[in-house]
Amino acid sequence: MNGAALRRLVRLNVARDRRASVSSVFGVGVGIASLVFFVALGLGVGHVVREKVFPVDTSLVEVVPSQLSLGLLGGKLDQSAVDRLAALPGVKRAYRKMQVRVPAVSVYDGDFFGRRLRMGIEVLAVGVDPDFVRRDVQLGDFSDPGEGQPIPSVAASRLLEIYNKTFAPARGLPQLSHGMVTGFTFPVDWNRSFVAETKPGPVTRSQAQLVGVSDRGLLAGIVIPLEAAVRLNAAAGADATTFTGVALEAVDPSQVPALVEAVKAMGLRVDDQERRLAENAGAAVAITTSAMALLSLLICVLAAFNIAHALSAAVRARERELGVMRAVGASRRDVFRLVMAEATLLGLMGGLGGTLLALAAATGVDMLAARVLPEFPFKPDSFFSLPAWLLTGGVVLGVIAAVAGAFLPARRASAIDPARVLAGQVG
Amino acid sequence: MISARRLSRSYDDGERGQVRVLDAVSLEVQAGEFVAVVGRSGSGKSTLLHVLGGLDTGYSGEVTVAGTALACLGDLALSRFRNEQVGFVFQSFHLVQGLTARDNVALPSFFAAAPPADTLARAQEALERVGLQGKAARLPSQLSGGERQRVAIARALFARPKVLLCDEPTGNLDAATSEQVVALFRELNRGGLTVLAVTHEERLRGAATRVLTLAEGKLQ
């Protein structure tokens, strides 16, 4: 049977059994729409969790000192330990981290992006090797400028997000972008605290200048150049030789598990709290998405059964017609192709319709969320991720469901005995 | 044109077991003959027609139609045989609802290995041959019983077959229409077409050049 004839007969049959066709297309459409919708939602929320809420760098291993010092076997994170860590197989770079070991506060009283602000907050500062955050630094080269100069500081992207979505609206303060905060300078009093005990000695006042915003920033503090932290600790008489952490950058993420084992073998600990949080949140999203996707797949399976039922009925109703086609030259294969092509068209219509429905529903939900949901940290512009593979997959799956449902009716149709169905009323 | 040797066909009839419908039937029909096969209901007339037309393959014996030995053909070759060598006319017309008269006539071209380039013209010509030139665009539901049967005959003639096989072609028609259809068969036969019709109908019997009687699976 040639393609034009096939198309013609398929169109004719679909149009003729309109009610059954609409029911089949509807079944496939609903299944595909819900599948695409929930998978897109899962992908979208998962993307926010991975990229915004817990922006975990999968190639980084955060090493911290052991809680128990094991003497020669390790536990302390001094320069020799850092050198040994850097020499581990699979390590690309080792970035040292040293917390400023005296409390600090910032007491701000002045113009804050056009608003008057008077506020005091505790400041946690961690010095890092400059290359750790260099790619996010917008101002200067992120090195210690020495005493009396503003200390370059990097804030966390998440901190800015929380400020913008929670703090700023509650205080009537302006929303800030990455670009706006770059260059902002604020005072820091070292060895001063509103809540913690301070070390003996004077309070040192300096300025800190934000030079960038980074995913590698500290959620509850600022990141400063390592040399500045060493200098501040030394000036305060605190430990300025051992590090509070080392971030190991693996050559590629697949080497992280082996690195973790090697670090533990050195008597050091791996701080994977953030990673575990990210994994747990990601797993929760994945489980929810999978459950919804499974439910949607079930709808697709039911749609396939519906198509099987509808086509079986259609084949039974058209037995004589198929017999006539066999009498005028249709082969078994022609009849099989005819029924399968009919199912393909229904599946294509259902798949396309379902995918478009999912797109419309996702757009509708996003619009509703923008209008109804209050602003909250990490609230995305869209809760959905609709990559091309998902849209194509929706259409393809619609066709697969229909074709799977049509297989047995098509086999049955091709096996029709024309002599039997065309037998006249006499023998 | 048609040759059948020791043709037998049995069916499994549940409680009655194997029922032999055709019992070593041998038959020769020359090109250009108009043969009527008569017999009581259940005598195996339709079965004989279906076997000769390549619709029924569960027989034993030898069948050759238009130079083609049917026993050794697979489904594809048998389908091509039906498409090119024989035309069927059934008692119940069996037109495809939803297709116009012209498209019903051209139905064999849908399944042809090489559809003729002049499909529409050929369908129109076949309709003219049966006197329905003005009704090409009508749907089966818009035609009378006689007109539907004439569309079915035009469909059987579309591929210019060598043999026309008719299964009670006047069984569902009134007397006047029946007469017209019989006249049409006579005319087609005069034009050189070999016609084999199984029938009860006296008029059709009268039009045949030879009448064979099938009784209890045997030709007499």
Image (tube, coloured by chain):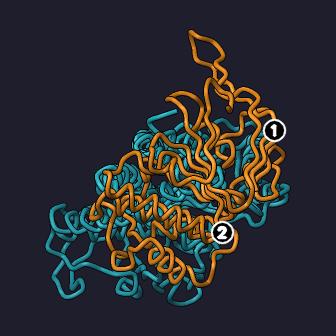
The picture quadrant where one finds residue B48 is top right
Residue B5, label in figure: 1
Instruction: State which chain disc 1 sits on.
Output: B
Q: Amino acid at mark 2?
A: Gly
Quarter of the image that includes the N terminus of chain B: bottom right
The colour assigned to chain A within the rendered structure? cyan
**Does mark 2 fall on the same chain as mark 1?**
yes
Q: Nearer the viewer, residue B185 or A325?
A: B185
Q: Secondary structure at mark 1?
A: strand
Q: Residue shown at 42%/70% (left/top)?
A: A157
Please give the name of the residue rendered at 35% of the width and 51% of the height, measured from the top-left corner.
B173
Q: Is residue A311 above or below residue A245?
A: above
Q: Quadrant of the C terminus of chain B?
A: top right
Q: Position of residue A25 (x, y in %)?
A: 37, 55
Nearer-N-terminus badge (1/2):
1
- Against A263, residue B162 (above or below) is below
Q: CA distance from mark 1 to mark 2?
A: 24 Å
For the point 36% across and 66% down, which residue is it? Answer: A356
Q: Residue at x 56, y 67 (%)?
A: B188
Mark 2: few/some/many CA within 10 Å (<14, 14-19, 20+): some
- Label 2 residue SS: loop
Q: How many marks?
A: 2
**Residue for badge 2:** B192
Q: Which chain is orange?
A: B
Relative vertical location of residue A7 with respect to residue A112 in this rendering, above or below = above
